[in-house]
Amino acid sequence: MNKINIADLINKNFYSFWLNDKPNAILSGGRSSMKSSVISLKLVIDFLEDDQGNVVCLRKVAKYLATSVYEQIKWAIYMLGVEDEFFFGRSPLVIMHRPTNTGFYFHGVDDPLKLKSMNIANGYYMALWYEELAEFAGVEDIDVVEDTFIRQDLGDKQVKVYYSYNPPRNPYSWVNEWKDSKASDDDYFLHHSTYLEDEKGFLSNQLIRKIEKYKELDYDYWRWMYSGEIIGLGGLVYNAAHFKWRDEMPSDDDILMIDIASDSGYSVSATVFLALGFTKRGNVYLLDTYYYSPANKTVKKAPSEFSKALNEFEKDVTSKHPKPIDMRTIDSAEAALRNQYFKDYGVRLHPVAKKKKVNMIENVTDLLAQGRFFMLNNENNKIFYEEHKKYVWDEDTLQTDDPKVIKEDDHSVDAFQYYVQDNLQKLGLKN
């Protein structure tokens, strides 16, 4: 391989990372801060200088590997102009070096114990990369995996371990506390960066404009998301200023499709249906809200009645806004209404793949901070606004790594979180 001029590829901010010889490197920073690009370039360059070395790239959830670390390593290989030396496999997910039969292996850590028996055909493990470290469950989650790959005695060599992540807002999140605990550990190198250090122009002007718009619309959100600051959670979950009323749909932003989101309750909890319009400009409009509370009612509604109500709600919305329904999202724990609706109308409601509450809240906050959410000004939608305006964190849990929200009058809030979670790709939000 030709000698690479690292100065042509790496910003000054990353030189200390590039030259460090400690076995562990923790890279934190805001989104779009070049962490993954620099790690992938270093991994490929070091790999090409060791004909027996193999690299393992890890994410907590396996389904995100193909669109993240796999593509990132592939990008680095193409950046270095050595793509002809590699075979890019998709099933299994692996990138093999043709001359040496060593490679880059990609694994999810849904079950850490499954990796304990992993073997390779040739050579040894030279490096591990934990991408999106904050997704992992905790220190035990990463230790089980790491011990598997660093146990082999390599003589004078050592397995390099890279950790990259965007810091959670909560200072008591395990990953924030873990990083702080390594500040005086001689085996760890700590590095923080933001998009502002992109001196080589890897980031497009379009992305920079988008980030700067975040800064104007919600400075605290920008500080966390793109500056990588740990700003805390505060009391209120959402910034009420991001919930903007509109008297009617704009003439220059047509609805492309309608999505329905549901949060169901029966004897105690309220049932909510939301109708949300997705527009050609990528905006989201709350078109209408159905809200039923069983409180103080002797006879509660049954699933068959909610099935009929949902169907009538859909018909009413599409008569006012004649566009197709794209996604019908429902709480994955709600089977009664799903089964009833399919029985009555032959239509399947889609159970959302829920994540931790704090992660689903972050996705909603991302959409709101972009200024892309609006509410049609009608009586039905007012309860949606009121519930979001009063949605707060449980103060007793804020100084823990698992903060909770107050579970009162949050039915439209949950339904909206399910909608965003189930439509991340369509909404252009990160998984």
Image: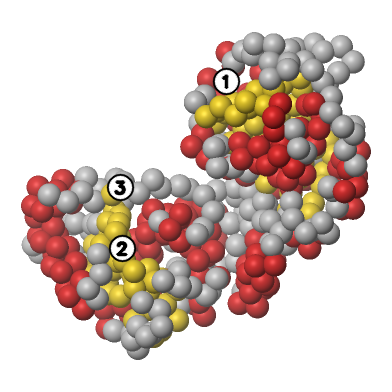
Name the outermost residue toward the front: 84
Q: Secondary structure at mark 3?
A: strand
Locate residue 385, reporting x and y percent.
Answer: 39, 76
Q: Is residue 293 rendered to the left or right of residue 162?
A: left
Mark 1 falls on what kind of element?
Answer: helix
The image shows residue 218, relative to residue 38, as above or below, that is below
Disc number for residue 115: 1
Of the pair 26 and 62, the residue shown nearer to us: 62
Residue corresponding to mark 2? 259
The chosen color scheme is secondary structure
Residue 272 seen: no
- Picture residue at 55% right of the left edge, 48% below the top: 402
Q: Earlier in the sequence, mark 1 or mark 2?
A: 1
Element on which disc 2 rests: strand
Badge 2 local density, few (<14 within 10 Å), some, or many (20+)? many
- For the residue pair 287 and 355, the one nearer the viewer reads as 287
In this rendered view, identify the residue nearer to me: 389 or 419: 419
